[in-house]
Image (spheres, rainbow, N blue to C red):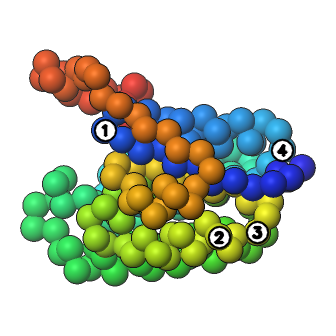
Amino acid sequence: MGIDRGLTHIYTGFGKGKTSAAFGLALRALGRGNRVLVFQFLKGGGELSGEAAMLKAMPGAELVAFTDQRHPIFCKGCDTGRLKESIGEGFRLASDKARSGEYDLVVMDEINNCMKEGWLDPALVVELIRNRPDGVELVLTGRGCPDEVIDAADYVTDMNLIKHPAEKGIMARRGVEY
């Protein structure tokens, strides 16, 4: 099917729903016969989330999750040098695949966090936005998206945190938060 004119979406902010919004768009694209690629940065080292497990099993979708990437707040003694190296390698692979013409929608989940933490140069992401094929829709998620990336995007949604169950000590629940 394909997408006539690919645009760039950013889902950022401190509220819940950035990844969920991206996966919802991926499901919509699959439902219209488009080919979908999802890269999950910083979510490795554990079981795939429910939405990632389902997407991985769907025809027309490909999911890449890096088992050696975990945000240091979740990984005591994390080697941030190695993490930065892995993120760079992952981004190069994601960029190559986004430019390949094989996919209509490419999601880079948590890539904004990688830039915010200084593990990925935002200029590389801006370059990808400006030089991807016309028919590729690009989605970038995560907190703290840099201004230069926001400026290069077409859609920008800031998920604002107003209230969250964690404030009451309620932990993430399987099937709802992951």
Q: Which amino acid does the dot numbered 4 rest on?
A: Gly
Lower sequence index among marks 3 and 1: 1
Q: Is residue 83 left or right of residue 34?
A: left
Secondary structure, mark 4, is loop
The quadrant of the rendering that contains the C terminus is top left
The residue that label 2 is drawn on is: 130
Nearer to us of marks 1 and 4 is 1
C-beta proximity under 8 Å, tags 3 and 1: no
Quote the CA–CA distance across marks 2 and 4: 25 Å
Q: Which mark is residue 14?
A: 1
Crowding at mark 1 (Cα within 10 Å: few <14, some 14-19, many 20+): some
C-beta proximity under 8 Å, tags 2 and 4: no
Crowding at mark 2 (Cα within 10 Å: few <14, some 14-19, many 20+): few
Viewer-proximal residue, 94 or 48? 94
Q: Which amino acid does the dot numbered 1 rest on?
A: Phe
Secondary structure, mark 1, is loop
Viewer-proximal residue, 76 or 116? 116
* Residue extending farthest right: 1
Lower sequence index among marks 2 and 4: 4
The residue that label 3 is drawn on is: 133
Quote the CA–CA distance across marks 2 and 1: 26 Å
The residue that label 4 is drawn on is: 33
- Is any part of residue 19 visible from this angle? no
Lower sequence index among marks 1 and 4: 1
Q: Position of residue 138 (x, y in %)?
A: 63, 56
Nearer to us of marks 3 and 4 is 3
Secondary structure, mark 3, is loop
C-beta proximity under 8 Å, tags 2 and 1: no
Q: Is residue 101 left or right of residue 120?
A: right
